[in-house]
Amino acid sequence: MLFLVRMDVQIPHDLPADTADAIKAREKAYAQDLQRQGKWQALYRVVGEYANYSVFDVESNDELHTLLSGLPLFPYMKIHVTPLARHPSSIR
């Protein structure tokens, strides 16, 4: 199942910088591991925003929820999920 996911990150201004940096490092490692597994297929930054668009390929809604809620930055995110289907005119 394919999903387009927009993630907007809103780290509190009063969160200590070293704490935020540690969370971001764990986030990067987690995201890269999911990419290597093929579950996180694409990751694009939104220019000028602390946000991204990502494409996930997972077995179920529940698996996607588990992966997203496991993100270290999850407590600081607003997430919007759009289920995708193959387009009949796509050559891929």
Image (cartoon, rainbow, N blue to C red):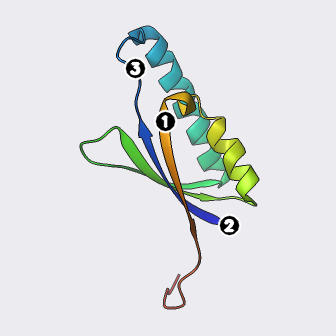
Mark 3 or mark 2, which has the lower sequence index?
Answer: 2
Q: Is residue 48 left or right of residue 37?
A: left
Residue for point 74% across, 51% down = 63
**First reached walking from the N terminus: tag 3 or tag 1:** 3
Confirm whether residue 47 shows in the render. Answer: yes
From this viewpoint, is residue 43 visible? Answer: no
What is the residue that sits farthest to the bottom in this orientation?
89
Tag 1: residue type?
Met
Q: Which residue is mark 3?
A: 12
Mark 3–mark 2 distance (CA, rounded to whole Å):
33 Å
Mark 2 sits on what residue?
A: 1
Image coordinates of residue 90 in percent, x first then y, are 49, 86
Identify the residue at horizontal 65%, vertical 55% (top origin). 38
Distance, label 3 to label 1, CA atoms, is 11 Å
Work out whether 26 lies above or below 69: above
Q: Position of residue 78 (x, y in %)?
A: 47, 40
Disc 3 secondary structure class: loop
Position above or below: 48 against 5 = above
Residue 6's spot in the image, x, y percent? 46, 51
Local crowd size for mark 3, using a 10 Å CA cut-off: few (<14), some (14–19), many (≥20): few
Which residue is at a point 70% across and 58% down the rendered structure image? 58
Which is more N-terminal, label 2 or label 1?
2
Q: Nearer the viewer, mark 3 or mark 2?
A: 3
Q: Secondary structure at mark 1?
A: strand
Residue 77: give its label. Answer: 1
Looking at the image, residue 15 sits to the left or right of residue 31; the answer is: left
